[in-house]
Amino acid sequence: MNYEAVIGLEVHIQLLTNTKMFCGCSTKFGMPPNTNVCPICLGMPGVLPVPNKKAIEFAIRLALATNCTISPVNQFARKNYFYPDLPKNYQISQYELPIAENGWLEIETKNGARKIGIVRIHMEEDAGKLIHDENKPLSYVDFNRAGVPLLEIVSQPDIRTPEEATSYLKTLRDIVVYLDICDGNMEEGSFRCDANISVRPIGQKELGVKTELKNINSFKNIQKALEFEIRRQTALLERGEEVIQETRLWDPAKGITVGMRTKEEAHDYRYFPDPDLVPIAIDKSWIEEIEKTLPELPGPKRKRFVQQYKLPEYDAEVLTSDKNLANFFEEVVSLFPKPKMVSNWIMSELLRKLNEEGCSISDSTISASNLAELLELIDDQTISGKIAKSVFEEMYETGKRASTIVEEKGLKQVTDADFLEKVVSEVIKENPKEVEKYLKGAEKVIGFFVGQVMKKTQGKANPRLVNELLRNKLKEIKNDSV
Amino acid sequence: MVAKLGIKELRKGLLKGEFTVREIVESYFERIERLNPRINAFITVSRDMAIEQALKFDENPHSIREKPLGGVPIAIKDCLCTQGIKTTCGSKILQNFVPPYDATCVKRLKEAGAIIVGKTNMDEFAMGSSTEHSAFGPTRNPWDIERVPGGSSGGSAAAVASGMVPVALGTDTGGSIRQPASFCGIVGLKPTYGRVSRYGLVAFASSLDQVGPMGKRVDDVAMLLQIIAGRDDFDATSVSIAVDKYCDNLNDRINDMVIGIPKEYFSHKIDPEIQQAIEEAIGIFESIGVKTVQVSLPHTDYGVAAYYIIAPAEASSNLERYDGVKYGLRSNPDKADLTEMYLKTRAEGFGPEVKRRIMLGTYVLSAGYYEAYYKKASQVRALIKQDFDLAFKKCDALITPVTPSPPFKIGEKVDDPLEMYLNDIFTLPASLAGVPGISIPYKLNSSGIPVGFQLIGPHFQESTLLKLAKAFHREIEYNPEIPEL
């Protein structure tokens, strides 16, 4: 029998606000333990939460970007469970009235574009971190992260394969990064994912029993964890056994999922509206105001790049994968309107260099206008493509303008036909053996002569012109000898 | 000598130089030293800090005038956080907790020049109506030390009534200011929910808790409210509606006002002397031109049931933070295990009434019971609020008993929680509706125990309540007495 997987993803993103969700503490990462804390985020007696307006704004941005309906009124609720990293032993989250519901995302799959539904987006606060002593039964708590604002994005169980799950996550990550609401860093935990997965025989309507996978911290792992879990569940069903509803942890070292707690052991979170926080009304004018500030999202931008700049799909995807890179491309094109040439240079030269150095486009020492100038110099034949590559290297190292480097090093292409004709004659005179070969029909020695001319001109000769002159000159000799 | 003083007399004497701030503060401490061993109104006395503050005033007498409460000693209920002063909430689990911050109301009082003399006893986490449920022993009623002072602000009420301090702050979740004020024969006001910041008030039931003033005179209560009321950016439930001029308006004419008599509050078995006193009070109000009208609040009887679902539900969540991890008591478990540490800390740290309510609250919020209990109780609450809204279309305030019976004997009801809960029957509805209520002392009954009544007003009409209370006291030439001790 053939089985298919049914997958729903729950993504937590850490918001890039300066301060925490319910107090004024900094959200800065990597500070010494328990330095970004105050009585409020430590849950001391008598303190009260006051919501961070910026976090609500960020939630609205994401809701708009994922086609969700923004609720006119949303409300915080308490999720009660005891754990030492949770200062109040309840997490302020949202339950009955989340900030947004009923959206969708379009993802690319190998069978074309697909829409994946989004059930809801809600706001909540992060917990602290436990540090366990390896030698003693003792743990330490760092509350720096406690109270950092999170959004949870819950997808519909519309995803069918691990590849689609990865595509959904990448699409969502690109969006949150584009929106400037999250840095999208999976390894550092600012973009986290849990997966609900079940399998069923193809054609069956009813859903199978699902498991929830936790502790998946990279795109590679999400793929592997889901693949493993599909194999595990399918094998169980094929043996006539049942899948147990449970939470399972992904073990990246062993490459397997391990049971953590069953449904019976699941928490009763005793959700109820948080009486410390009044329901939040979001009026239309606020939404409209935020809508105006939304950037063009990666999907639409990619489509536009294909249409407007006549770029191949692949180029458009690479260029729009990073908002800053896309902006850089458009800036260069605005100065030098040959998009495909710009794209080639960015993708083959600039990105190669940046990858080598482990940098992003914002670290580039070559500005958009300098790159445009370099391309202009190639285009008007001031320098050859080959020289341009060395100029590019130097631009990257020194930050100097292309024209300055060309000027300083005298790299200007030689297009003076009279001068080049002299050089060509010299080369032919100095290499009678090669001329002999040519006369016997070895056309390819032309390459040798070009090389010699280039050598004499330090590579500055216009290759097209040199070729033309050489062919004419050799043809003359051939005709004379007949 | 200082026992009978109100804020006005005290300030007058200080400003005239009849006595220094230090002398005043010392004489209250003398009284505390003499009386507190019998009354047990204070858990902590902050003598050194108070004297230090008093000396600062005396060095610069000008500052007494500049601050509205300059040099006025005050006691603070021990569930309000005070920076550098132990705040126990009447619980073993917080017996050594010293907050690094002041509650907003405390901060405002300090800025106004008030001097904190100590922290008053209370039922643990404000859960109780007798101050017997304190980890630090019961407080006694200064009028009869065999009897309870009421609760949970029993320490504040007893301290003020016995003249150990001129004024105090209490908190009221279901009657915890009004009932002890009545039992001890002082004035106690529960403001509208949202009128006073709850920041720094150790939460019992967040949607009901309010901080309020307690004093021997209406003027004292009005003055304290003036200082502590108003929006606070640290409390999202505090309201930005402008604060009335309570003191300036206090003597405004009230003879165009209407007082409603809600029939449901008089259909219960009420102590005859309480009943008699309220009838007299109604007559006195009528004699000064206040009209009276019969009104009905049909859902009154459901108040106790709704309250004892909502308040424990919120409490069960609010009290989760006391786990031994971060502050307060941590019990050492027999084996090194997290759950064992939680269980032992909470088993040893909380008293029986708190445990009872945590269990009750946890139960009503559990999956499968939430709809039947918490949701239903919230709906009942909305109906009770609607009762008040409708009644206040016909009148400016309601007159009701504070409790069905006078102060009971210590130990009398401590083993009968239901009987204890029913003591709050007349104070709970105003808490559920979020409207203000004031407990007004009238006279002593035949056993020499204070008797009074409650006025309940519409949202943010504390001014109305204070004016009516003041007019009543003016008419009967009320002169607060201090019990012989």
Image (cartoon, grey):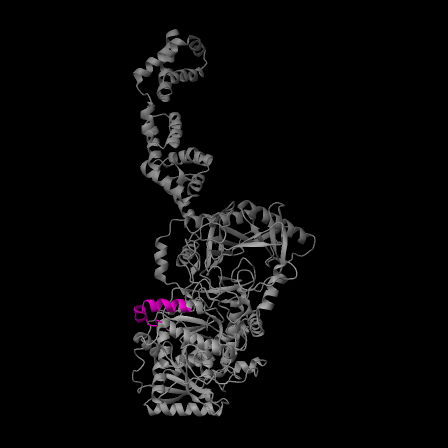
Residue B461 in sight in this render:
no
Percent coordinates x, y for residue B339 in the rendering: 61, 61
Using the image, determine if residue A142 lies above or below residue B98.
Answer: above
Q: Quadrant of the C terminus of chain A?
A: top left
Percent coordinates x, y for residue B387 in the rendering: 43, 81
Frontmost residue, A218 versus A239: A218
Using the image, determine if residue B270 lies above or below residue B384.
Answer: below
Total marks in image: 0
Any magenta on residue B149?
A: no
Magenta span: predominant SS is helix
Q: Dividing the picture into quarters, in which one does residue B417 lie? A: bottom right
Q: Which residues are magenta?
A: B50-71
Frontmost residue, B281 versus A303: B281
Using the image, determine if residue A193 lies above or below residue A477.
Answer: below
In this image, A441 relative to B365: left or right?
left
Frontmost residue, A83 versus A79: A83
Using the image, determine if residue B351 lies above or below residue B418.
Answer: above
Percent coordinates x, y for residue A263 in the rendering: 62, 61
Residue A321 in sight in this render:
yes
In this image, B56 relative to B332: left or right?
left
Percent coordinates x, y for residue B286 in the rendering: 35, 91
Q: Dividing the picture into quarters, in which one does residue B214 lie? A: bottom left
Q: Dividing the picture into quarters, in which one does residue B243 lie? A: bottom left
Frontmost residue, B377 versus A321: B377
Any magenta on residue B67?
A: yes
